[in-house]
Image: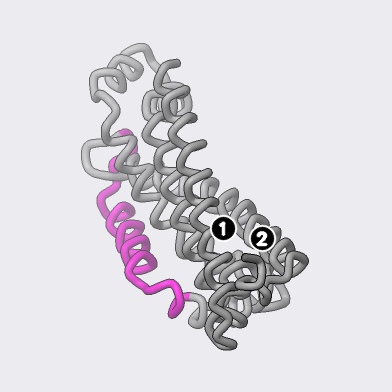
Amino acid sequence: MFGHFSNVRPAELQEATYATLRMLGLSLAFTVVLGLLVGVLLFLTSRGQLLSQPAVYAVLSFVVNVLRSVPFVILMITIMPFTKWLTGTSIGVEGSIPPLVVAAAPFFARLVETSLREVDRGVIEAAQAMGASSWSIVRRVLLREAGGGLFAGVTLTAVTLVSFTAMSGVIGGGGLGDLALRYGYQRFQTDVMLVTVVLLVLLVQLLQTLGDLLVRWVSRK
């Protein structure tokens, strides 16, 4: 049985898995922070909301749509100079994080905007009637009421980032995607490709399960 996986090296597999988890963890953290800010701004500046500014909303929406429409592989290559300026390298884990964030943050921002739009308008108006500031309404009403949707958005974004980390192997980003590309594809080592695919599928299943549990927990509170 193990002879069919003779090309699989546990040490390299462990290193690649660790690199993928690093890329995922760091990029997800930056994506959630940046995407949450942009998503809240999109919601607040949209027509009829607390800080209604149609011009600002139009600009933000345009930028988000442009970044979402660019295929990830092309985006990685396009912003290589920026990535190198920011991190000092355009390869490896560090070189993969900026394009991962640039690609995923607009995606998550739209999910945030959608979740906030689902909050009952009456709850917002009640908070305004009690004299709550815009910041208090965002923090104590909007984010709490939209908690389940926000966690679902984080889960979906994390799953999407797993596929992006795999594609980062194209520019030598490291991780399981890089291992699959260098050994599984370029050297025709099918066993390596199979193992990396299985690990990525297991990672996605784990993230989805944890995310669903968090959504149910938050929704009950």
Q: Residue shown at 59%/76% (left/top)? A: 82
Task: Based on the picture, tell me whether residue 54 belongs to the magenta stretch.
Answer: yes
Task: Based on the picture, tell me whether residue 218 belongs to the magenta stretch.
Answer: no
Say if 171 sits above or below 104 in the image.
Answer: below
Q: Nearer the viewer, residue 186 or 4?
A: 4
Residue 90's x, y, as percent?
64, 78
Residue furthest right as drawn: 11
Residue position for label 1: 199
Q: Residue shown at 38%/24% (left/top)? A: 145
Q: Residue shown at 54%/51% (left/top)? A: 203
Three-letter amino acid code of the residue under disc 1: Leu
Question: Dot 1 lies on which element?
Answer: helix
Residue furthest front as drawn: 1
- Please indicate, yes or no, whether residue 19 appears anywhere in the rendered image: yes
Residue furthest top as drawn: 130
Callout 1 crowding tier (Cα within 10 Å): few <14, some 14–19, many ≥20: some
Which numbered tag is attached to residue 17? 2
Q: Residue shown at 55%/85% (left/top)? A: 188
Say if 91 sits above or below 140 in the image.
Answer: below
Q: Name the quadrant of the C terminus.
A: top left
Residue 184's x, y, as percent?
56, 79
Give the Cα distance between marks 1 and 2: 8 Å
Q: Name the image quarter holding residue 106.
A: bottom left
Asked if the residue at tag 2 contacts the one at tag 1, i.e. Cβ–Cβ closer than 8 Å, the answer is yes
Q: Nearer the viewer, residue 96 or 206?
A: 206
Say if 165 sits above or below 151 in the image.
Answer: below
Q: Nearer the viewer, residue 134 or 151?
A: 151
The mark total stands at 2
Q: Name the image quarter holding residue 171.
A: bottom right
Q: Which residues are magenta?
A: 50-75
Callout 2 crowding tier (Cα within 10 Å): few <14, some 14–19, many ≥20: many
Three-letter amino acid code of the residue under disc 2: Thr
